[in-house]
Amino acid sequence: MINILFAHNNFPAQFGFVAEAAMARGYRCAAIASPTGRPMPGMPMEKWSAGRSSSPSILKDAIRAEADLIRAQAAADAALRLRHQGFEPDVIVGHPGWGETIYLREIFPKARQIIYAEYYYRTADGDVGFDPEFGPASAPMELHAKNIGLALALSEADAIVAPTPFQASRLPDVFRQRTEILHEGVDTARTRKNPEARWVTADGRVLDGSRPIITFVSRKLEPLRGYHIFMRSLPRLLEAVPDADVIIIGEAARAGYGAAAPGGRTWAEVILDEIRDKVDLSRIHFAGRVPYESFINALSLSWAHVYFTYPFVMSWSLLEAMACECLVIGSATAPVRDAITAGENGLLLDFFDHGGLSQTLIEACRSPRTFDQLRLAARQTVETRYDRAGVSVSGWMSLIQRLAGR
């Protein structure tokens, strides 16, 4: 039997399917998490609470490092409680983004550590400074200092897992040498095109896919995910294709990955105001957050799905759209190129070319059958490279068994 400790601020998050697979094999698992973590059946969990925040007068560049160390100590206390209950892990699977794994070597010195490398901050070739329209949220020195806790956690790793080649490329060479590419994958049995899909708009209309539907998904509707570029493409599209509807899934939130919108507003409001007088708003449907089944229905009806992003973490929604046989029109940025090859399983455009995006969407609406092969190839890509049961689980289990010496 292998004992596995999962450490994640929001457990189960990226680790849920790994924990399920491990317990199905008879492994003994436990978890530590913040108060936002959710326990899994049959798995003990200890939650930590920081108890204090960063010092008010601390050097600005050190705020993140101090916060990580505060959380690291709280997580170590939670790990000690598990040890006192008799739990001794052979392998620790941890997300270091909030500092929780920093002290775990001191609590469990014999355990081998797998550290999940989601994003290592850089001042070049990433999200910061990519879009000249919006200034960086952090100064270069401050941004670099955000890596202090992350680098300390990675230095203790026996193995590092990055979900995509782009995310692995962000790591310093000394860490990249220990890195494996293992994406969480997609449950392709659940995430697939629904031929019976329907979408009911706020005004009661039922969309069944017989007329053009354009979809866009972004958790926070922000520039980092190309929301502004997408919205600026709509006036020309909706004028040229008068029977098209647009479904936008995501929250109009003030806090996101990038810089905040001015005046305490949301980017959803700011960018919509740019085009408000140029479009028929009754054809743009802001759905907010929706149940997963509704999300799949929207993708199943989509004639074209737009996924634009800065060089940053690739969203799960891209692979889910591909699994639903969407025609994905993506930005030609590194994260998207990890999954899509232009002309083979999707289309790629310059991130900033909203005019080119308009024209491509018009073509997708006027000649939808032209892109059928791309749709099928998108699904095939996910089945071959990102299927959770067939690819991701086996990769994770093999890595865990190897480190545990089994």
Image: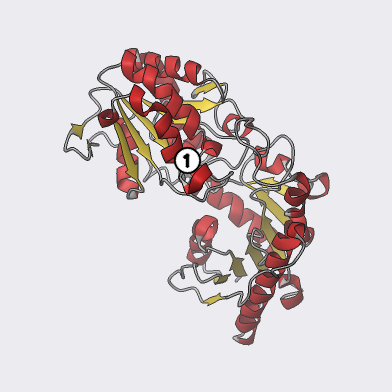
User: Quick check: 20 left or right of 352?
Assistant: left
Vertical side of 393 occupied by 107: above or below = below
Badge count: 1
Vertical side of 63 occupied by 367: above or below = above
Depth check: give the residue in front, 21 or 231. 231
User: Quick check: 196 left or right of 266?
Assistant: left
The answer to whether any part of residue 261 appears in the image is: no
**At which x and y percent is residue 186?**
47, 44
Residue underneath mark 1? 267
Helix, strand or loop at disc 1? helix
Identity of the residue drawn at 75% across and 71% down: 105
**At which x and y percent is residue 196?**
22, 36
User: Quick check: 349 left or right of 272?
Assistant: right
**Toward which corner of the image does residue 243 lie, by quadrant?**
top left
Amino acid type for the residue under numbered disc 1: Trp
Picture quarter with the C terminus? bottom right
Q: Residue furthest right?
A: 174
Q: Residue furthest bottom?
A: 84
Q: How is the image coloured?
A: secondary structure
Vertical side of 313 occupied by 352: above or below = above
**Toward which corner of the image does residue 358 lie, by quadrant?**
top left
Q: Residue furthest left?
A: 204
The answer to whether any part of residue 382 appears in the image is: yes
Depth check: give the residue in front, 93 or 209. 209
**At which x and y percent is residue 32?**
58, 72
